[in-house]
Amino acid sequence: MIQRIQSIWLLLVVASSVLTFFLPFAYAAESNNLVELTAQSYWYTIVLTVLAGLGGLIAIFLYHDRKLQIRVCSYTLIVSLGLLATYIVKTLDYPKMGPSLFCVLVGAIPILLVMSIRAIRNDMKLVEESDRLR
């Protein structure tokens, strides 16, 4: 399970999803209080973050069925892009909201998913070539 590179990418997806619950995507100072935008800020960001993390976790354990693993990663990629779009739209609600250093975590999730899909396809190609040699 962990011997493949896509398992590491997917594990990083899960770790990034978990960290977005605790680290702010953006913050703003309004009327003497600090407003932080995290995954816990709205119910739909909680749902999208949990779906992205669970999608990565489920895809790790689907290493026997690579087509299903790619499909789960693709759906998780769509969810993560929706999550990123949600964060960007919510950042525009506050005029003085600035991005945090940890906004990289949310942006890294789709990139890591694309890297894992490419690694899964390379595995499929490798298995196909080894079957041809037999």
Image (cartoon, grey):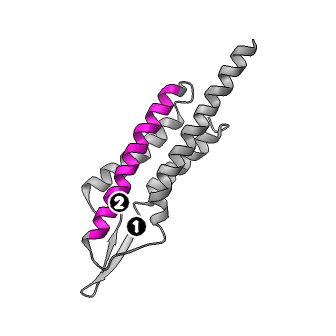
Q: Residue at x 64, y 27 (%)?
A: 125
Residue that extends furthest to the top in the rendered view of this protein: 134
Q: In screen coordinates, is 60 left or right of 25?
A: right
Q: Is residue 11 left or right of residue 27?
A: right
Looking at the rendering, the stretch of residues picked out in magenta corresponds to 67-92
To which quarter of the image does residue 45 belong?
bottom left
- 57 or 119, which lies in front? 119
| Residue 30 location (% of width, % of height) | 26, 83
Q: Residue at x 37, y 45 (%)?
A: 79
Quadrant assignment for the N terminus: top right
| Quadrant where the image shows the C terminus | top right
Q: Residue visible at 47% across and 50% down?
A: 110
Callout 1: 10 Å neighbours few (<14), some, many (20+)?
many
Foreground mark, 1 or 2? 1
Residue position marked by numbered label 2 in the rendering: 39
- Asked which quadrant contains residue 90, the reply is bottom left
- Find disc 1 in the rendering and name its residue: 25
Contact? badges 1 and 2 (CB < 8 Å): yes
Residue furthest to the right in view is: 133
